[in-house]
Image (cartoon, helix red, strand yellow):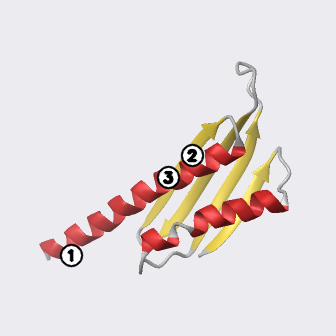
Amino acid sequence: MKVQIKTTKIELSGELKMYTEKKMGMLEKYLGDVPVSNCDVEIEHVLNKQSSGKVYRAETNLFLPGEILRVEKTEETIIKAIDKVKDHLVLMIKRYKEKKQDKKRRK
């Protein structure tokens, strides 16, 4: 799976890039034999006047056959945002695979 990382208002360090690629690479074990063209990840430092602390947003688009899985999470740290995105994508992948199996059974 090809992982493309884009950052906004934050510098992409080697450590952050490796962490993101590692977490998104973990999705392959849940995908199994489902072909994936690529995975776009955007990480952003959000400047919000109402929140006093730092806020980070992670967004991921996973391109599957016939569907795009999109997840966006906002957290206090970059790591938490990436972890939450990965966890939510795992649930969406499981639902996607169940939906495909149900369609095969109906035929």
Image quadrant where residue 93 sits: bottom left
Q: Is residue 92 above or below residue 31?
A: above
- Residue 40 placement (x, y as % from top left): 63, 62
Residue occupying the point 73% across, 45% down:
44
Query: Looking at this rendering, what residue extends furthest in the left direction?
Result: 106
Q: Secondary structure at mark 3?
A: helix
Compute the Cα span from label 2 to label 1: 30 Å
Disc 3 target residue = 87
Q: Comparing marks 2 and 3, which lies closer to the viewer?
A: 3
Disc 1 target residue = 104
Disc 2 target residue = 72
Q: Amino acid at mark 3?
A: Asp
Q: Amino acid at mark 1?
A: Lys
Compute the Cα span from label 2 to label 3: 11 Å
- Residue 37 placement (x, y as % from top left): 55, 76
Q: Amino acid at mark 2?
A: Glu
- Residue 70 placement (x, y as % from top left): 51, 54
